[in-house]
Image (tube, grey):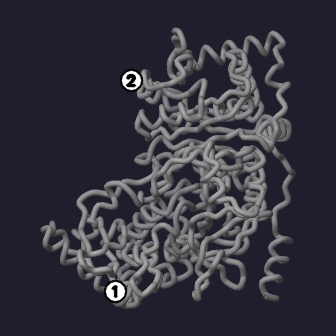
Amino acid sequence: MKEKLKISEELKQKYHKCEEVTNFKQILDRSAEIYKTRTAFKLKDKDGNIYNKTYEELKADVTVLGTSLIENGLLNKRIAVIGKNSYKWVISYLAASIVGVVVPIDKELHSDDVINFMNVSESKCILGDSKNLKKINENIEKLENKETLFIDFDSKIQEGNSLSFAVQMENGKTLVEEGNTEFDKITVNPDELKILLFTSGTTGNAKGVCLSQRNICSNILSIYGIVKVKRSDLFFSILPLHHTYECTIGFLLPLYSGASICYCDGLRYITSNMLEYHPSVILCVPLLLEKMYQKIMKSIQKTLPKKYTENLKENENIIDKLPFYIKGIVKRKVKNSLGGRLRVFIVGAAAVNPEIADTFDKLGLNSLQGYGLTECAPLVAGNTDFFKRNDSAGLPIPNVEYKIDNPDRDGVGEIIVKGPNVMLGYYNMPEETEKVLKDGWFHTGDLGKIDENGFLYITGRCKSVIVTKNGKNIYPEEIEAYLNDSPLISESLVMGIQKENDDETYVNAQIFPNMDAIKEYLKGTVPTKEEVKKIMADVVSGVNSKIPNYKHIKNFAVRDKEFEKTTTQKIKRYGDNMKK
Protein backbone atom coordinates (compact mmCIF):
# COMPACT_ATOMS: atom_id res chain seq x y z
CA MET A 1 0.00 0.00 0.00
CA LYS A 2 2.85 2.39 0.78
CA GLU A 3 4.34 1.79 -2.66
CA LYS A 4 0.98 2.60 -4.24
CA LEU A 5 0.72 5.90 -2.34
CA LYS A 6 4.31 6.77 -3.19
CA ILE A 7 3.67 6.26 -6.91
CA SER A 8 0.45 8.27 -6.63
CA GLU A 9 2.28 11.26 -5.13
CA GLU A 10 5.07 10.89 -7.68
CA LEU A 11 2.50 10.92 -10.46
CA LYS A 12 0.75 14.03 -9.17
CA GLN A 13 4.04 15.90 -9.15
CA LYS A 14 4.69 14.92 -12.76
CA TYR A 15 1.28 15.88 -14.18
CA HIS A 16 1.62 18.55 -16.86
CA LYS A 17 0.01 21.80 -15.73
CA CYS A 18 -2.95 23.13 -17.71
CA GLU A 19 -5.46 25.98 -17.71
CA GLU A 20 -9.03 24.97 -16.95
CA VAL A 21 -11.77 25.15 -19.58
CA THR A 22 -15.33 23.83 -19.33
CA ASN A 23 -16.77 24.32 -22.82
CA PHE A 24 -15.78 24.39 -26.49
CA LYS A 25 -16.40 28.13 -26.87
CA GLN A 26 -13.75 28.74 -24.22
CA ILE A 27 -11.34 26.47 -26.11
CA LEU A 28 -11.96 28.38 -29.36
CA ASP A 29 -11.57 31.80 -27.74
CA ARG A 30 -8.55 30.81 -25.66
CA SER A 31 -6.71 29.14 -28.54
CA ALA A 32 -7.37 32.02 -30.96
CA GLU A 33 -6.07 34.45 -28.34
CA ILE A 34 -2.96 32.47 -27.34
CA TYR A 35 -1.97 30.74 -30.59
CA LYS A 36 -3.28 33.35 -33.07
CA THR A 37 -1.48 32.73 -36.39
CA ARG A 38 -0.05 29.33 -35.45
CA THR A 39 -1.23 26.50 -37.69
CA ALA A 40 -4.31 24.68 -36.41
CA PHE A 41 -4.84 22.51 -39.52
CA LYS A 42 -2.74 21.40 -42.46
CA LEU A 43 -5.14 20.84 -45.36
CA LYS A 44 -5.04 19.99 -49.06
CA ASP A 45 -6.66 21.93 -51.88
CA LYS A 46 -8.34 20.16 -54.83
CA ASP A 47 -4.95 19.90 -56.59
CA GLY A 48 -3.33 18.21 -53.59
CA ASN A 49 -1.31 21.24 -52.46
CA ILE A 50 -0.92 21.62 -48.69
CA TYR A 51 -2.03 24.88 -47.06
CA ASN A 52 -2.56 26.01 -43.46
CA LYS A 53 -5.52 27.20 -41.40
CA THR A 54 -4.58 29.29 -38.37
CA TYR A 55 -6.26 29.36 -34.97
CA GLU A 56 -7.65 32.81 -35.70
CA GLU A 57 -9.09 31.56 -39.00
CA LEU A 58 -10.60 28.54 -37.25
CA LYS A 59 -12.45 30.74 -34.75
CA ALA A 60 -13.64 33.04 -37.54
CA ASP A 61 -14.93 30.09 -39.61
CA VAL A 62 -16.80 28.54 -36.66
CA THR A 63 -18.33 31.95 -35.85
CA VAL A 64 -19.45 32.40 -39.47
CA LEU A 65 -21.01 28.93 -39.68
CA GLY A 66 -22.59 29.27 -36.24
CA THR A 67 -24.13 32.60 -37.24
CA SER A 68 -25.57 30.97 -40.37
CA LEU A 69 -27.05 28.09 -38.35
CA ILE A 70 -28.73 30.56 -35.99
CA GLU A 71 -30.10 32.50 -38.97
CA ASN A 72 -31.64 29.22 -40.19
CA GLY A 73 -33.54 28.85 -36.92
CA LEU A 74 -31.30 26.18 -35.40
CA LEU A 75 -30.50 27.80 -32.04
CA ASN A 76 -30.87 25.13 -29.31
CA LYS A 77 -31.82 22.48 -31.91
CA ARG A 78 -30.30 19.06 -32.61
CA ILE A 79 -27.85 19.23 -35.53
CA ALA A 80 -26.37 16.08 -37.09
CA VAL A 81 -22.95 15.86 -38.78
CA ILE A 82 -21.84 13.05 -41.10
CA GLY A 83 -18.90 12.52 -43.44
CA LYS A 84 -15.23 11.69 -43.74
CA ASN A 85 -12.67 13.47 -41.53
CA SER A 86 -12.28 17.01 -42.85
CA TYR A 87 -12.00 20.65 -41.86
CA LYS A 88 -15.66 21.15 -42.81
CA TRP A 89 -16.62 18.33 -40.44
CA VAL A 90 -14.75 19.83 -37.47
CA ILE A 91 -16.09 23.37 -37.87
CA SER A 92 -19.59 21.90 -38.29
CA TYR A 93 -19.11 19.92 -35.06
CA LEU A 94 -17.90 22.96 -33.13
CA ALA A 95 -20.56 25.33 -34.49
CA ALA A 96 -23.38 22.81 -33.95
CA SER A 97 -22.28 22.00 -30.39
CA ILE A 98 -22.22 25.69 -29.45
CA VAL A 99 -25.45 26.68 -31.24
CA GLY A 100 -27.38 23.56 -30.23
CA VAL A 101 -26.72 19.86 -29.66
CA VAL A 102 -24.38 18.11 -32.10
CA VAL A 103 -25.25 14.58 -33.23
CA PRO A 104 -22.15 13.01 -34.87
CA ILE A 105 -23.16 10.05 -37.06
CA ASP A 106 -21.01 7.21 -38.40
CA LYS A 107 -20.69 7.55 -42.19
CA GLU A 108 -20.37 3.76 -42.54
CA LEU A 109 -23.91 3.15 -41.30
CA HIS A 110 -26.70 2.00 -43.58
CA SER A 111 -29.09 4.81 -44.57
CA ASP A 112 -31.88 3.23 -42.45
CA ASP A 113 -29.68 3.52 -39.34
CA VAL A 114 -28.70 7.12 -40.15
CA ILE A 115 -32.35 8.10 -40.60
CA ASN A 116 -33.32 6.23 -37.43
CA PHE A 117 -30.71 8.15 -35.42
CA MET A 118 -31.91 11.43 -36.92
CA ASN A 119 -35.51 10.57 -36.04
CA VAL A 120 -34.66 9.45 -32.49
CA SER A 121 -32.49 12.52 -31.84
CA GLU A 122 -35.07 14.84 -33.47
CA SER A 123 -32.36 16.45 -35.56
CA LYS A 124 -33.57 19.51 -37.49
CA CYS A 125 -30.51 19.70 -39.75
CA ILE A 126 -27.70 17.53 -41.04
CA LEU A 127 -24.37 18.74 -42.42
CA GLY A 128 -22.32 16.35 -44.53
CA ASP A 129 -20.74 15.46 -47.84
CA SER A 130 -22.81 14.74 -50.97
CA LYS A 131 -22.18 10.99 -50.84
CA ASN A 132 -23.68 10.60 -47.38
CA LEU A 133 -26.53 13.05 -47.82
CA LYS A 134 -27.49 11.19 -51.00
CA LYS A 135 -27.90 7.99 -48.94
CA ILE A 136 -30.47 9.76 -46.76
CA ASN A 137 -32.28 11.39 -49.67
CA GLU A 138 -32.80 7.99 -51.31
CA ASN A 139 -34.93 7.00 -48.30
CA ILE A 140 -36.27 10.47 -47.47
CA GLU A 141 -39.81 9.16 -46.91
CA LYS A 142 -38.58 7.47 -43.69
CA LEU A 143 -37.41 10.80 -42.25
CA GLU A 144 -40.05 12.00 -39.78
CA ASN A 145 -39.17 15.71 -39.89
CA LYS A 146 -40.02 16.76 -43.44
CA GLU A 147 -38.52 20.22 -42.78
CA THR A 148 -35.02 18.87 -42.09
CA LEU A 149 -32.29 21.07 -43.56
CA PHE A 150 -29.54 19.37 -45.58
CA ILE A 151 -26.31 21.39 -45.73
CA ASP A 152 -24.06 19.85 -48.39
CA PHE A 153 -20.28 20.23 -48.02
CA ASP A 154 -19.75 19.72 -51.77
CA SER A 155 -22.67 21.45 -53.49
CA LYS A 156 -22.77 25.07 -54.68
CA ILE A 157 -26.53 24.94 -55.41
CA GLN A 158 -29.37 25.70 -52.99
CA GLU A 159 -32.88 24.40 -53.58
CA GLY A 160 -35.65 24.07 -51.00
CA ASN A 161 -34.29 22.39 -47.87
CA SER A 162 -31.07 21.42 -49.66
CA LEU A 163 -28.51 24.08 -48.83
CA SER A 164 -24.92 24.65 -49.93
CA PHE A 165 -22.24 24.74 -47.22
CA ALA A 166 -20.26 27.29 -49.28
CA VAL A 167 -23.31 29.55 -49.69
CA GLN A 168 -24.15 29.25 -45.98
CA MET A 169 -20.59 30.27 -45.09
CA GLU A 170 -20.87 33.29 -47.38
CA ASN A 171 -24.23 34.23 -45.85
CA GLY A 172 -22.80 33.91 -42.34
CA LYS A 173 -19.75 35.96 -43.26
CA THR A 174 -21.96 38.76 -44.62
CA LEU A 175 -24.06 38.77 -41.44
CA VAL A 176 -20.95 38.95 -39.21
CA GLU A 177 -19.47 41.77 -41.32
CA GLU A 178 -22.77 43.65 -40.99
CA GLY A 179 -22.49 43.47 -37.20
CA ASN A 180 -24.44 40.31 -36.31
CA THR A 181 -23.16 39.08 -32.92
CA GLU A 182 -25.74 36.37 -32.16
CA PHE A 183 -23.11 33.62 -32.08
CA ASP A 184 -20.82 35.62 -29.79
CA LYS A 185 -23.72 36.22 -27.39
CA ILE A 186 -24.24 32.50 -26.76
CA THR A 187 -23.41 31.37 -23.23
CA VAL A 188 -22.71 27.65 -23.17
CA ASN A 189 -23.98 25.73 -20.16
CA PRO A 190 -21.14 23.24 -19.59
CA ASP A 191 -23.38 20.77 -17.74
CA GLU A 192 -26.28 20.29 -20.14
CA LEU A 193 -26.60 17.87 -23.06
CA LYS A 194 -24.49 19.18 -25.94
CA ILE A 195 -23.16 16.04 -27.65
CA LEU A 196 -25.44 13.09 -28.49
CA LEU A 197 -23.58 10.01 -29.75
CA PHE A 198 -25.11 6.75 -30.86
CA THR A 199 -23.03 3.72 -30.06
CA SER A 200 -23.69 0.03 -30.54
CA GLY A 201 -20.20 -1.07 -29.52
CA THR A 202 -19.33 -4.69 -30.23
CA THR A 203 -22.55 -6.27 -28.93
CA GLY A 204 -25.31 -4.40 -30.81
CA ASN A 205 -28.28 -2.50 -29.31
CA ALA A 206 -27.60 1.14 -30.18
CA LYS A 207 -27.90 3.67 -27.38
CA GLY A 208 -27.72 7.46 -27.46
CA VAL A 209 -24.95 8.61 -25.10
CA CYS A 210 -25.58 12.08 -23.65
CA LEU A 211 -22.42 14.08 -23.00
CA SER A 212 -21.94 17.61 -21.72
CA GLN A 213 -19.08 19.86 -22.75
CA ARG A 214 -17.73 19.64 -19.20
CA ASN A 215 -17.56 15.84 -19.64
CA ILE A 216 -15.30 16.20 -22.67
CA CYS A 217 -13.32 19.23 -21.45
CA SER A 218 -12.48 17.48 -18.17
CA ASN A 219 -11.17 14.56 -20.22
CA ILE A 220 -9.06 16.87 -22.39
CA LEU A 221 -7.43 18.39 -19.30
CA SER A 222 -6.85 14.97 -17.71
CA ILE A 223 -5.19 13.62 -20.86
CA TYR A 224 -3.03 16.74 -21.19
CA GLY A 225 -1.90 16.07 -17.61
CA ILE A 226 -0.41 12.67 -18.49
CA VAL A 227 0.65 13.13 -22.13
CA LYS A 228 2.62 16.27 -22.90
CA VAL A 229 1.35 17.82 -26.13
CA LYS A 230 3.82 20.26 -27.68
CA ARG A 231 2.87 23.25 -29.79
CA SER A 232 5.19 21.86 -32.44
CA ASP A 233 3.24 18.57 -32.57
CA LEU A 234 1.35 17.55 -35.69
CA PHE A 235 -1.46 15.04 -35.10
CA PHE A 236 -2.17 12.66 -37.99
CA SER A 237 -5.91 11.92 -37.99
CA ILE A 238 -6.81 8.45 -39.29
CA LEU A 239 -9.71 7.18 -37.15
CA PRO A 240 -13.30 8.41 -37.68
CA LEU A 241 -14.09 11.71 -35.98
CA HIS A 242 -17.62 10.71 -34.98
CA HIS A 243 -16.02 8.44 -32.37
CA THR A 244 -15.11 10.07 -29.03
CA TYR A 245 -11.62 8.54 -29.05
CA GLU A 246 -10.55 10.44 -32.17
CA CYS A 247 -12.77 13.45 -31.49
CA THR A 248 -11.54 14.12 -27.94
CA ILE A 249 -7.90 13.06 -28.21
CA GLY A 250 -7.14 13.57 -31.91
CA PHE A 251 -9.11 16.79 -32.46
CA LEU A 252 -10.08 18.74 -29.33
CA LEU A 253 -6.91 17.95 -27.31
CA PRO A 254 -4.51 19.35 -29.96
CA LEU A 255 -6.77 22.40 -30.43
CA TYR A 256 -6.58 23.10 -26.70
CA SER A 257 -2.80 22.56 -26.74
CA GLY A 258 -1.87 24.74 -29.73
CA ALA A 259 -0.73 21.78 -31.84
CA SER A 260 -1.69 21.13 -35.48
CA ILE A 261 -3.85 18.48 -37.19
CA CYS A 262 -3.71 16.89 -40.65
CA TYR A 263 -6.00 14.32 -42.25
CA CYS A 264 -5.26 10.95 -43.82
CA ASP A 265 -6.49 10.59 -47.41
CA GLY A 266 -7.50 6.98 -46.73
CA LEU A 267 -6.00 3.82 -45.23
CA ARG A 268 -4.09 2.98 -48.42
CA TYR A 269 -2.38 6.39 -48.27
CA ILE A 270 -1.13 6.23 -44.67
CA THR A 271 2.54 5.74 -45.61
CA SER A 272 2.58 8.36 -48.38
CA ASN A 273 0.66 10.86 -46.21
CA MET A 274 3.16 10.43 -43.38
CA LEU A 275 6.00 11.23 -45.76
CA GLU A 276 4.07 14.30 -46.96
CA TYR A 277 3.02 15.73 -43.60
CA HIS A 278 5.78 14.48 -41.21
CA PRO A 279 3.45 13.97 -38.20
CA SER A 280 4.69 13.59 -34.64
CA VAL A 281 1.59 12.03 -33.01
CA ILE A 282 -0.72 9.31 -34.31
CA LEU A 283 -3.88 7.93 -32.73
CA CYS A 284 -4.49 4.38 -33.84
CA VAL A 285 -6.04 1.04 -32.98
CA PRO A 286 -3.91 -2.06 -32.28
CA LEU A 287 -4.71 -3.53 -35.70
CA LEU A 288 -3.03 -0.59 -37.45
CA LEU A 289 -0.05 -0.69 -35.09
CA GLU A 290 0.34 -4.42 -35.72
CA LYS A 291 0.33 -3.92 -39.50
CA MET A 292 3.00 -1.21 -39.19
CA TYR A 293 5.01 -3.51 -36.93
CA GLN A 294 4.84 -6.41 -39.40
CA LYS A 295 5.90 -4.17 -42.28
CA ILE A 296 8.79 -2.68 -40.30
CA MET A 297 10.04 -6.04 -38.98
CA LYS A 298 9.88 -7.57 -42.46
CA SER A 299 11.96 -4.67 -43.79
CA ILE A 300 14.48 -4.97 -40.93
CA GLN A 301 14.88 -8.72 -41.45
CA LYS A 302 15.45 -8.27 -45.19
CA THR A 303 18.13 -5.60 -44.81
CA LEU A 304 20.12 -6.95 -41.84
CA PRO A 305 22.81 -9.66 -42.08
CA LYS A 306 21.49 -13.15 -41.27
CA LYS A 307 23.61 -13.45 -38.13
CA TYR A 308 21.25 -10.93 -36.48
CA THR A 309 17.97 -12.36 -37.79
CA GLU A 310 18.48 -16.12 -37.46
CA ASN A 311 18.31 -18.39 -34.42
CA LEU A 312 16.31 -15.98 -32.30
CA LYS A 313 15.38 -17.50 -28.94
CA GLU A 314 11.77 -17.48 -27.79
CA ASN A 315 10.74 -13.97 -26.67
CA GLU A 316 14.08 -12.56 -27.89
CA ASN A 317 13.69 -9.24 -29.69
CA ILE A 318 15.76 -8.73 -32.83
CA ILE A 319 16.50 -5.12 -31.80
CA ASP A 320 18.24 -6.36 -28.63
CA LYS A 321 20.71 -8.40 -30.71
CA LEU A 322 21.95 -5.42 -32.70
CA PRO A 323 25.21 -3.61 -31.91
CA PHE A 324 24.74 -0.03 -30.74
CA TYR A 325 25.79 1.61 -34.02
CA ILE A 326 23.58 -0.67 -36.18
CA LYS A 327 20.65 -0.11 -33.82
CA GLY A 328 21.06 3.64 -34.35
CA ILE A 329 20.97 3.22 -38.13
CA VAL A 330 17.85 1.00 -37.93
CA LYS A 331 16.05 3.46 -35.63
CA ARG A 332 16.84 6.33 -38.00
CA LYS A 333 15.64 4.40 -41.07
CA VAL A 334 12.40 3.34 -39.38
CA LYS A 335 11.69 6.87 -38.17
CA ASN A 336 12.41 8.32 -41.63
CA SER A 337 10.03 5.79 -43.21
CA LEU A 338 7.29 7.22 -40.96
CA GLY A 339 7.94 10.84 -41.87
CA GLY A 340 10.96 11.58 -39.68
CA ARG A 341 9.22 13.33 -36.75
CA LEU A 342 7.01 10.65 -35.21
CA ARG A 343 7.47 10.43 -31.44
CA VAL A 344 4.34 8.80 -30.03
CA PHE A 345 1.50 6.41 -30.88
CA ILE A 346 -1.61 6.79 -28.72
CA VAL A 347 -3.38 3.44 -28.93
CA GLY A 348 -6.94 2.63 -27.89
CA ALA A 349 -10.07 0.57 -28.60
CA ALA A 350 -8.39 -2.76 -27.70
CA ALA A 351 -5.32 -4.20 -25.99
CA VAL A 352 -1.92 -3.95 -27.68
CA ASN A 353 0.42 -6.91 -27.89
CA PRO A 354 3.12 -5.92 -25.31
CA GLU A 355 5.87 -7.33 -27.55
CA ILE A 356 4.87 -4.92 -30.31
CA ALA A 357 4.76 -1.97 -27.91
CA ASP A 358 8.18 -2.97 -26.51
CA THR A 359 9.66 -3.09 -30.02
CA PHE A 360 8.39 0.38 -30.88
CA ASP A 361 9.86 1.65 -27.60
CA LYS A 362 13.24 0.17 -28.55
CA LEU A 363 12.97 1.96 -31.91
CA GLY A 364 12.48 5.28 -30.11
CA LEU A 365 8.75 5.45 -30.85
CA ASN A 366 6.72 5.70 -27.65
CA SER A 367 3.44 3.76 -27.72
CA LEU A 368 0.91 4.70 -25.04
CA GLN A 369 -2.21 2.63 -24.64
CA GLY A 370 -5.27 3.49 -22.63
CA TYR A 371 -8.78 2.35 -21.81
CA GLY A 372 -11.98 4.24 -22.34
CA LEU A 373 -15.62 4.21 -23.38
CA THR A 374 -17.92 6.62 -25.20
CA GLU A 375 -19.83 6.97 -21.91
CA CYS A 376 -16.66 8.37 -20.29
CA ALA A 377 -15.84 10.90 -23.02
CA PRO A 378 -13.81 8.57 -23.50
CA LEU A 379 -10.60 8.01 -21.46
CA VAL A 380 -10.61 6.33 -18.04
CA ALA A 381 -7.07 4.97 -17.74
CA GLY A 382 -3.87 5.57 -19.64
CA ASN A 383 -0.15 4.98 -19.65
CA THR A 384 1.68 8.25 -19.18
CA ASP A 385 4.65 9.59 -21.08
CA PHE A 386 6.68 9.32 -17.87
CA PHE A 387 5.40 6.10 -16.26
CA LYS A 388 3.96 3.12 -18.17
CA ARG A 389 3.59 -0.63 -18.54
CA ASN A 390 3.03 -2.05 -22.01
CA ASP A 391 0.98 -5.00 -20.75
CA SER A 392 -1.51 -2.72 -18.97
CA ALA A 393 -4.20 -0.21 -19.93
CA GLY A 394 -2.47 2.20 -17.54
CA LEU A 395 -3.34 4.18 -14.44
CA PRO A 396 -6.44 6.26 -13.65
CA ILE A 397 -6.20 9.61 -15.41
CA PRO A 398 -6.27 12.74 -13.19
CA ASN A 399 -9.64 13.37 -11.47
CA VAL A 400 -10.99 9.93 -12.42
CA GLU A 401 -11.40 6.95 -10.08
CA TYR A 402 -11.96 3.32 -10.88
CA LYS A 403 -12.36 0.15 -8.86
CA ILE A 404 -13.30 -3.49 -9.35
CA ASP A 405 -16.84 -4.41 -8.36
CA ASN A 406 -17.39 -7.85 -6.82
CA PRO A 407 -13.95 -9.30 -7.70
CA ASP A 408 -13.44 -13.06 -7.89
CA ARG A 409 -10.57 -14.90 -6.20
CA ASP A 410 -8.22 -13.75 -8.98
CA GLY A 411 -9.23 -10.12 -8.44
CA VAL A 412 -11.25 -9.99 -11.67
CA GLY A 413 -14.57 -8.17 -11.66
CA GLU A 414 -16.50 -5.41 -13.38
CA ILE A 415 -14.68 -2.10 -13.80
CA ILE A 416 -16.68 0.79 -12.38
CA VAL A 417 -15.77 4.45 -12.87
CA LYS A 418 -16.41 7.80 -11.19
CA GLY A 419 -15.40 11.24 -12.46
CA PRO A 420 -16.46 14.47 -14.22
CA ASN A 421 -16.10 12.68 -17.58
CA VAL A 422 -18.94 10.22 -16.92
CA MET A 423 -21.97 10.75 -19.17
CA LEU A 424 -25.27 12.35 -18.18
CA GLY A 425 -27.12 9.16 -19.19
CA TYR A 426 -28.60 7.34 -22.17
CA TYR A 427 -30.95 9.40 -24.33
CA ASN A 428 -34.61 8.69 -23.48
CA MET A 429 -33.62 5.39 -21.86
CA PRO A 430 -34.03 5.92 -18.08
CA GLU A 431 -34.12 2.18 -17.29
CA GLU A 432 -30.87 1.54 -19.20
CA THR A 433 -29.30 4.55 -17.46
CA GLU A 434 -30.30 3.23 -14.03
CA LYS A 435 -28.65 -0.10 -14.84
CA VAL A 436 -25.23 1.48 -15.37
CA LEU A 437 -25.23 4.60 -13.14
CA LYS A 438 -25.45 3.54 -9.49
CA ASP A 439 -24.45 5.65 -6.48
CA GLY A 440 -22.31 7.92 -8.65
CA TRP A 441 -20.42 5.02 -10.25
CA PHE A 442 -20.63 4.04 -13.93
CA HIS A 443 -20.72 0.28 -14.46
CA THR A 444 -18.75 -0.29 -17.65
CA GLY A 445 -19.67 -3.89 -18.43
CA ASP A 446 -15.94 -4.54 -18.87
CA LEU A 447 -14.00 -6.99 -16.75
CA GLY A 448 -10.59 -6.25 -15.34
CA LYS A 449 -8.24 -6.35 -12.41
CA ILE A 450 -6.00 -3.79 -10.70
CA ASP A 451 -2.49 -4.52 -9.44
CA GLU A 452 -0.99 -3.22 -6.20
CA ASN A 453 0.21 -0.04 -7.94
CA GLY A 454 -3.14 0.83 -9.49
CA PHE A 455 -2.41 -0.38 -13.03
CA LEU A 456 -5.53 -1.62 -14.82
CA TYR A 457 -5.64 -4.86 -16.81
CA ILE A 458 -8.65 -5.53 -19.06
CA THR A 459 -9.71 -9.17 -19.21
CA GLY A 460 -12.90 -9.01 -21.28
CA ARG A 461 -16.58 -8.09 -21.41
CA CYS A 462 -19.11 -9.26 -18.83
CA LYS A 463 -21.43 -10.37 -21.63
CA SER A 464 -18.69 -12.36 -23.38
CA VAL A 465 -17.62 -14.52 -20.43
CA ILE A 466 -17.94 -18.27 -20.99
CA VAL A 467 -19.08 -20.05 -17.80
CA THR A 468 -18.41 -23.79 -17.54
CA LYS A 469 -20.67 -26.32 -15.80
CA ASN A 470 -18.30 -26.22 -12.82
CA GLY A 471 -18.67 -22.44 -12.55
CA LYS A 472 -15.26 -21.56 -13.95
CA ASN A 473 -14.99 -18.33 -15.97
CA ILE A 474 -13.27 -18.30 -19.34
CA TYR A 475 -12.47 -14.94 -20.92
CA PRO A 476 -12.60 -15.21 -24.74
CA GLU A 477 -10.29 -12.23 -25.17
CA GLU A 478 -7.50 -14.06 -23.32
CA ILE A 479 -7.66 -17.04 -25.70
CA GLU A 480 -7.97 -14.74 -28.72
CA ALA A 481 -4.76 -13.01 -27.62
CA TYR A 482 -2.94 -16.36 -27.63
CA LEU A 483 -4.29 -17.21 -31.10
CA ASN A 484 -3.55 -13.77 -32.54
CA ASP A 485 -0.01 -14.02 -31.22
CA SER A 486 0.71 -16.40 -34.10
CA PRO A 487 1.85 -14.60 -37.27
CA LEU A 488 -0.14 -17.25 -39.20
CA ILE A 489 -3.44 -15.87 -37.85
CA SER A 490 -4.88 -12.50 -38.87
CA GLU A 491 -7.73 -12.44 -36.35
CA SER A 492 -9.93 -14.72 -34.29
CA LEU A 493 -13.18 -14.83 -32.35
CA VAL A 494 -13.77 -17.16 -29.41
CA MET A 495 -17.19 -18.10 -28.03
CA GLY A 496 -18.87 -20.75 -25.92
CA ILE A 497 -21.09 -23.41 -27.49
CA GLN A 498 -23.28 -26.15 -26.05
CA LYS A 499 -23.75 -29.49 -27.77
CA GLU A 500 -27.11 -31.24 -27.91
CA ASN A 501 -27.92 -33.31 -24.82
CA ASP A 502 -24.90 -31.86 -23.01
CA ASP A 503 -25.10 -29.08 -20.45
CA GLU A 504 -21.35 -28.37 -20.61
CA THR A 505 -20.14 -25.26 -22.46
CA TYR A 506 -17.18 -25.73 -24.78
CA VAL A 507 -14.72 -23.22 -26.19
CA ASN A 508 -15.12 -22.69 -29.92
CA ALA A 509 -12.90 -20.50 -32.12
CA GLN A 510 -13.35 -18.95 -35.52
CA ILE A 511 -10.05 -18.17 -37.20
CA PHE A 512 -9.22 -15.94 -40.16
CA PRO A 513 -5.75 -17.05 -41.34
CA ASN A 514 -2.97 -14.77 -42.57
CA MET A 515 -2.59 -16.28 -46.05
CA ASP A 516 0.50 -14.23 -46.93
CA ALA A 517 2.30 -15.50 -43.83
CA ILE A 518 1.19 -19.07 -44.54
CA LYS A 519 2.52 -18.89 -48.12
CA GLU A 520 5.82 -17.59 -46.75
CA TYR A 521 5.80 -20.39 -44.15
CA LEU A 522 5.35 -22.90 -47.01
CA LYS A 523 8.24 -21.34 -48.97
CA GLY A 524 5.97 -19.69 -51.54
CA THR A 525 3.60 -22.61 -52.11
CA VAL A 526 -0.12 -21.76 -52.32
CA PRO A 527 -1.78 -23.95 -49.66
CA THR A 528 -4.90 -26.06 -50.12
CA LYS A 529 -7.85 -25.66 -47.73
CA GLU A 530 -6.83 -28.90 -46.03
CA GLU A 531 -3.27 -27.62 -45.51
CA VAL A 532 -4.55 -24.36 -44.04
CA LYS A 533 -6.79 -26.29 -41.63
CA LYS A 534 -3.86 -28.52 -40.61
CA ILE A 535 -1.64 -25.48 -39.96
CA MET A 536 -4.41 -23.83 -37.91
CA ALA A 537 -4.87 -27.08 -35.96
CA ASP A 538 -1.17 -26.98 -35.06
CA VAL A 539 -1.52 -23.37 -33.86
CA VAL A 540 -4.60 -24.29 -31.78
CA SER A 541 -2.72 -27.25 -30.31
CA GLY A 542 0.13 -24.91 -29.37
CA VAL A 543 -2.29 -22.50 -27.68
CA ASN A 544 -3.96 -25.35 -25.76
CA SER A 545 -0.55 -26.41 -24.43
CA LYS A 546 -0.18 -23.00 -22.76
CA ILE A 547 -3.57 -22.80 -21.00
CA PRO A 548 -5.46 -24.90 -18.40
CA ASN A 549 -7.54 -27.84 -19.65
CA TYR A 550 -10.90 -26.20 -18.95
CA LYS A 551 -9.94 -23.33 -21.30
CA HIS A 552 -8.90 -25.59 -24.18
CA ILE A 553 -10.28 -24.84 -27.63
CA LYS A 554 -12.39 -27.91 -28.43
CA ASN A 555 -13.53 -26.89 -31.92
CA PHE A 556 -12.45 -24.36 -34.48
CA ALA A 557 -13.48 -23.22 -37.95
CA VAL A 558 -11.39 -21.47 -40.59
CA ARG A 559 -13.01 -18.42 -42.18
CA ASP A 560 -12.40 -17.24 -45.73
CA LYS A 561 -13.21 -13.60 -45.01
CA GLU A 562 -12.47 -11.04 -42.31
CA PHE A 563 -14.83 -10.51 -39.39
CA GLU A 564 -17.28 -7.64 -39.56
CA LYS A 565 -15.95 -4.80 -37.42
CA THR A 566 -16.95 -1.50 -35.85
CA THR A 567 -15.41 1.68 -37.28
CA THR A 568 -12.71 1.51 -34.60
CA GLN A 569 -11.79 -1.96 -35.93
CA LYS A 570 -13.21 -3.99 -33.04
CA ILE A 571 -14.72 -7.32 -34.05
CA LYS A 572 -18.49 -7.29 -33.57
CA ARG A 573 -19.63 -10.00 -31.16
CA TYR A 574 -23.07 -10.30 -32.74
CA GLY A 575 -24.75 -10.95 -36.09
CA ASP A 576 -22.98 -13.01 -38.76
CA ASN A 577 -19.73 -13.07 -36.77
CA MET A 578 -21.36 -15.26 -34.12
CA LYS A 579 -22.64 -17.90 -36.53
CA LYS A 580 -20.84 -21.08 -35.61
**Label number found at residue 138:** 2
**Label number found at residue 544:** 1
**Residue at image x 82%, y 82%?**
5
Label 2: state its secondary structure.
loop
Front residue of this view, candidates 469 and 117:
469
**Residue at image x 55%, y 76%?**
358
**Residue at image x 73%, y 55%?**
421
The part of the image, by quadrant, that contains residue 533 is bottom left
Label 1 crowding class (10 Å Cα cut-off): few <14, some 14-19, many 20+? some
Per the model, the C-alpha gap separating discs 1 and 2 is: 51 Å
In this rendering, is residue 299 above or below 554?
Answer: above
- Residue 226 can be seen in this image: no
- Residue 96 can be seen in this image: yes
In this rendering, is residue 491 above or below 51?
Answer: below
Type of amino acid under label 2: Glu
Counting residues from the N terminus, which is met first, the one under dot 1 or under dot 2?
Answer: 2
From the top left corner, tell me how far across and down residue 216 is, in percent.
72, 49
